[in-house]
Image (cartoon, rainbow, N blue to C red):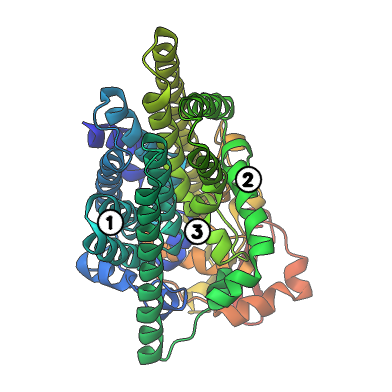
Amino acid sequence: MLLAVALVAHFQMIANGLQNPDSLWLGGDYHIADSWELSLGRWGLVLVDLLRGGFVSPILSGAGMLVLYTAAGMLLVRVLEAQNSRPLRWLIPLTVVLAPQVLITESYLFCSIAYALAFLLAVAAAYWVQRLPRWPGVLLGALFLMASLSLYQSNVGVTAGLLLMWLLRTLLDEPEALAAFARRLGRTLLACALGLVAYYMVLQLRLYTTQVALSGYKGADSVGVLHALTSLGTGIPQAYRDFFDYFFGRTLAANYYHVRPVYALLFVLAAVALAVRLWQIRRHRVACLLAVVLVVLLPLAVAAIDLIVPETTLILLTCSPLLTVVPFVLTLCARYMGERRLARAAVWLAVGLTVVLLRGYLLQLNTDSTTLLASQRTTLTVAQSLLQDLQQRPEYRAGMPVAIIGQPESGNYPNLSPCYDKADSLMQMGLLFHSPHANAEGWQQIFKQYLGVALNWSSREQVMEIVNTPEYQMMAVYPQEGSLQEIQGCLVARVA
């Protein structure tokens, strides 16, 4: 049933094969991870690509991704020990599969399954550390964490955050058992450390055997213990800023449709539940102090990637660890509000607020997919018109190289989606990047993937030379007269 809800909510994305510029540029109908993904530290991507045969299908990618996210949401219920609450058994998985960043992940058609699997593996890592005794739990948790990081490194915050939440719950449940808490803390730290070390060792081995160097993109080449320690002064404030911005800003998540006040009210209810429990165990002062410290550290745990690589620029796709926060808030309310009538009313208020939050998520999914669909329709209309105009030119028929430069939205074809202003920034971008060489190569994929036409395209170097010429700077913008000209032996169409 949960999967059916997810498929309906994401139907517009799946049915129209909607994708972002990265997916258009790198994907196509077939993709196997190569040295580029390895240079980013994602050595496990090639294994997932080989398992799926390299085929990139909107239906299989979208449905497969949602199966994995649904499984992760259901496992999250067990990790947070909320399986005895019928409302939470439904609400927690729904806060995962309907979250806006899941749709952003879905727009990466060539790797959405791998990224969803990375999230599931990170949740499973925390599950095994919790459920299995001592060394079996540590080793299996480390193994699953290593596998998750090999697909997408930002999911380290999923495991770290869930384990911190587990430590907080056990501390509040058994404030007198500080020795047991210390043992759990040791297991947590050891599992995370072993997982990180194992991931890094395999990465170095793969880099050595393939003669590939880590890329400077998003700080991948700066990963290391020493760098992380020396960058804490930058990473710690950044983690708190990103945590706040995700829930109450507009930069990471769009956060329209009243979700920000809902987040605020849910956090207030969780704070009340914690205060109630701390008052009940007030005689255990050390446990109370440790609980407060863990709450303060929660943003650092879920935003752990900020601590490891402070130079990275977070986008909604990388915020998967923050998907665990609302489920945790719900479990705090259900667990510690008490049994009195007023407490039960507060729990049901949290449930009602989550329903309102899910309504906001659904509207955001529709906003983002509608905006991207409008861009796709416009871009394909312009592509078909350009193809007709090119075919009428004798230079094209003679085999002259072609360059199409610019985004339709930046020229004479603005995005006509009625909810464009409320869409995520990546969805607002449409199908093409802003830079000339990137959108020129994007046009090649549009003609190939959507129109089934392979032209004699100019090289990236030639495109960069053309955009700096006075002739190009003086050109009109398509479809105006003079927007299609010959420059340096290349037939150029200036779209923007």
Judged by depth in the image, the label closer to the viewer, 3 or 2, is 2
425 vs 62, left or right, is right
- How far across and down, in percent of the image, does residue 443 sit? 50, 63
Identify the residue under disc 2: 251
**Image quadrant where one finds the C terminus:** bottom right
Neighbourhood count class around disc 2 (C-alpha, 10 Å): few under 14, some 14–19, many 20 upward: some
Question: Which residue is farthest front?
Answer: 283
At 61% from the left and 46% from the top, the residue drawn is 413
Identify the residue under disc 3: 21
- Estimate the spatial distance between the alpha carbons at disc 1 and disc 2, rounded to whole Å: 30 Å
- Estimate the spatial distance between the alpha carbons at disc 3 and disc 2, rounded to whole Å: 19 Å
Asked whether residue 12 appears in the rendered view, the answer is no
Q: Which mark is residue 57?
A: 1
Up/down of 307 relative to 376, above or below:
below
336 vs 375, left or right, is left
First in sequence: mark 3 vs mark 2: 3
